[in-house]
Amino acid sequence: MNSEFIEVHCAVPTKAVAMLIAKMLVEEQLCACVNIIESVTSIYRYEGEFCEDEEFLLLIKTDQEHFTAVETKILSLHPYDTPEIIALPILRGTKAYMDWVKKSLK
């Protein structure tokens, strides 16, 4: 088990925002990879109102050490007042892939 590595989830409203955040995170070596999943339906309540939105979901592969920098970068680029930024531990992964993730980070 290696909980040093995490996957950060972040929902965004448009593909343009998804691409901007993904490219900035990878270019600045704050993460190894960002998968962009299109057409995620989010159903939630926000400020007392029922909401149903089509969004894009970012799956960001990084490590614990880079979480704060990833969070800061997302917050600087994200249009929502309260964006979803959550981290889940990566409990296992192939050695080669996890080595690549580590080497991809600055």
Image: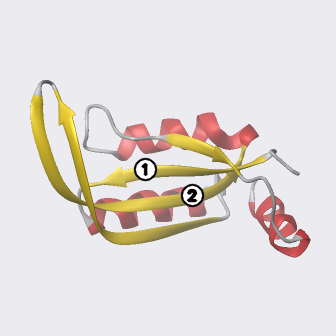
Residue in view at x 24 percent, y 62 percent: 14
Residue in view at x 73 percent, y 53 percent: 90
Alpha carbon distance from label 2 to label 1: 8 Å
Q: Residue 98: give its label.
A: none
Kind of residue sitting beneath label 2: Ile
Q: Position of residue 54 (x, y in %)?
A: 20, 61
Q: Nearer the viewer, residue 99 or 44?
A: 44
Mark 2 or mark 1: whose residue is earlier in sequence: 1
Residue in view at x 59 percent, y 63 percent: 26
Q: Quadrant of residue 47?
A: top left
Total tally of numbered discs in the picture: 2
**Does 11 sit above or below residue 64?**
below
Q: Residue extending furthest top? A: 47
- Residue 50 is left or right of residue 86, and the answer is left
Residue in view at x 26 percent, y 32 percent: 81
In this figure, which residue is indicated by the disc labeled 2?
A: 60
Evaluate if marks 2 and 1 touch, with contact meaning CB atoms under 8 Å apart. Answer: yes
In this figure, which residue is indicated by the disc labeled 1?
A: 10
Q: Secondary structure at mark 2?
A: strand
Q: Quadrant of residue 103?
A: bottom right
Q: Mark 2 packing: few (<14 Cα in 10 Å), some, or many (20+)?
A: many
Q: Nearer the viewer, residue 95 or 91?
A: 91
Q: Secondary structure at mark 1?
A: strand
Q: Position of residue 32 (x, y in %)?
A: 67, 64
**Does 66 sit above or below residue 20?**
above
Q: Mark 1 packing: few (<14 Cα in 10 Å), some, or many (20+)?
A: many
Q: Quadrant of residue 21?
A: bottom left
Q: Position of residue 56 (x, y in %)?
A: 32, 63
Kind of residue sitting beneath label 1: Cys
Q: Nearer the viewer, residue 66 or 2?
A: 2
Q: Position of residue 23 (x, y in %)?
A: 48, 65
